[in-house]
């Protein structure tokens, strides 16, 4: 079907209904655009990310879309503490911050976007650009049309594969083992020592951990989670495929969810914790029944605008998690897009606005990519 319209309808299709998709959808809605989100997952997305550091641009999106910011948006910590492998405190600095969770931000944002415009169980297969519009095609045979399509479909973005087939993620040479444990299941000594934002390094090993909201986004003491992230070098061709083969024998690409790690790798995590971690972190890792794992990858982009198709969030750039800024970058992409599109009334306006939006967003993505690579290479490989 070829659709040709002459006037701008202010209609956007967003592919991907995770954080980046919801930030962009709610911001565009706030400036009067008609927005529909298409998410591959048929059920509500669950807490796959665990914890994250709360950054200003995420709060700015919440404020801008009128989300009630009642109470705390996470757990506060005052200090950053670095332990040596024996557990001696090497450094303690004042660094007040808030740790939140993927679920808390997702549920807040999801409440601010109407169900009737959030379409689940829709996997994008293809995109066709026309003179004055663009169409998306889904796996159920359906097709929708709008002024723009925004790819917020994450690191393995289908939208990116369509508009920029050669751009790919590259493995950084290490993985993040991760764990979430109920605060009340933390051994008492470990809980006392790890109350702040804590770090420890060893050979090809860097761990950090902090408290995050618990079930139902609770910040009550005793009902929170302890979230740890342990970076370890894992060889790409021999070890990584084995680590990414789950306990049912299925080969996964970059992510091993909780409960699916093969027993051999779970035991290796416990074994290595005994050998490499200071006592408090060792206790937290050993108390984690279902550690999970994620390969750390890099992604950069030379463009974020391909005529009427845009890339935002992880679909465009994946800075390494040491920046703690990927979600804030997704929020910044959305806030800037809202400002750029606030006054467009024609296709020419739209074209100019997108060109102006793209430049600083590319700069931000590249800056975080470089900062994250430098930090990661230094922390894990010492160079
Ligand atoms: C170890 C680790 C720690 C991290 N810690 C932090 C942190 O402290 N702070 C921080 O800011 N960030 C952190 N991040 C990054 C953060 O999780 C993401 O950057 C952020 O959630 C933005 O993701 P996104 O919405 O762009 O993509 P995603 O969350 O990947 O969402 C993409 C969505 O698109 C959907 N989708 C995919 N393909 C299709 C398709 N074809 N059709 C329809 N839908 C589709 C998917 O189902 C998914 O819901 C961390 C990441 C890692 C790996």
Image (tube, rainbow, N blue to C red):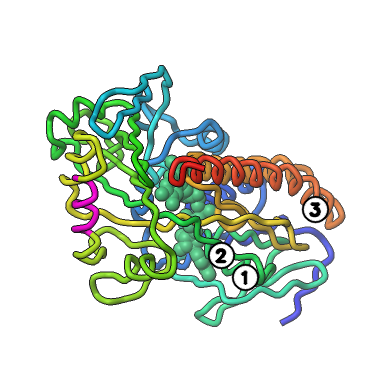
Which residue in the protein does label 1 denote? 161
Q: Give the left or right position of residue 125, taking residue 344 as reference.
A: left
- Magenta stretch in the rendered image: 266-274
Residue 144, quarter of the rendered image: bottom right
Mark 2 is surrounded, within 10 Å at the Cα level, by few (under 14), some (14 to 19) or many (20 or more) other residues, namely some
Residues under numbered marks 1 and 2 in contact, where contact means CB atoms less than 8 Å apart: yes
User: Disc 1 to disc 2, how far (Cα)?
Assistant: 6 Å
Residue 104 is one of the magenta-drawn residues: no
- Let me know if residue 109 appears in the view: no
Which residue in the protein does label 3 denote? 350
Q: Is residue 357 above or below residue 253?
A: above
Q: Is residue 180 above or below residue 348?
A: above
| Disc 2 C-beta below 8 A from ligand 1 | yes
Tell me what residue is drawn at x 63 percent, y 55 percent: 300
Q: Main secondary structure of the magenta part?
A: helix
- Let me know if residue 237 appears in the view: yes
Tell me what residue is drawn at x 42 percent, y 25 percent: 97
Q: Nearer the viewer, residue 145 or 19?
A: 19
Q: Nearer the viewer, residue 48 or 122?
A: 48
Q: Of callouts 2 and 3, which one flags the residue occurring earlier in the amino acid sequence?
A: 2
């Amino acid at each position: 079907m070829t659709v040709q319209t002459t006037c701008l309808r202010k209609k956007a299709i967003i592919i991907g209904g995770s954080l980046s998709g919801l930030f962009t959808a709610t911001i565009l809605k706030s400036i009067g655009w008609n927005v529909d989100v298409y998410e591959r997952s048929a059920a509500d997305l669950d807490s796959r990310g665990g914890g994250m550091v709360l950054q200003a641009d995420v709060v700015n999106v919440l404020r801008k879309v009128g989300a009630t910011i009642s109470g705390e948006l996470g757990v506060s910590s005052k200090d950053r503490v670095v332990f040596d492998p024996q557990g001696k405190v090497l450094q303690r600095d004042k660094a007040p911050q808030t740790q939140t969770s993927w679920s808390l931000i997702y549920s807040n944002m999801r409440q601010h976007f109407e169900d009737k415009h959030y379409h689940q169980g829709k996997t994008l297969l293809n995109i066709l650009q026309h003179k004055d519009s663009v169409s998306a095609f889904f796996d159920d045979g359906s097709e929708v049309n709008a002024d723009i399509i925004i790819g917020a479909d994450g690191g393995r973005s289908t939208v990116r594969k369509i508009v920029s087939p050669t751009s790919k993620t590259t493995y950084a040479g290490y993985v993040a083992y991760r764990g979430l444990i109920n605060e009340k299941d933390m051994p008492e000594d470990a809980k006392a020592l790890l109350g702040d934002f804590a770090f420890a390094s060893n050979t090809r090993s860097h761990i950090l951990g902090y408290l995050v909201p618990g079930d139902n986004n609770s910040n009550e003491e005793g009902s929170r989670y302890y979230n740890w992230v342990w970076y370890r070098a894992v060889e790409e061709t021999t070890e990584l495929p084995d680590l990414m083969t789950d306990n049912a024998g299925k080969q996964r690409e970059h992510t091993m969810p909780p409960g699916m790690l093969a027993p051999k790798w779970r035991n290796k995590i416990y074994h290595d914790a005994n050998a490499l971690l200071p006592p408090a972190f060792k206790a937290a890792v050993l108390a984690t029944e279902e550690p999970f794992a994620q390969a750390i990858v890099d992604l950069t982009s030379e463009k974020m605008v391909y005529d009427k198709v845009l890339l935002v969030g992880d679909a465009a750039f994946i800075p390494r998690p040491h920046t703690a800024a990927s979600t804030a970058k997704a929020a910044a992409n959305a806030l800037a897009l809202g400002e750029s599109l606030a006054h467009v009334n024609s296709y020419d306006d739209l074209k100019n606005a997108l060109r102006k939006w793209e430049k600083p967003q590319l700069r931000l993505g590249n800056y975080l990519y470089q900062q994250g690579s430098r930090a990661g290479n230094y922390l894990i490989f010492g160079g």
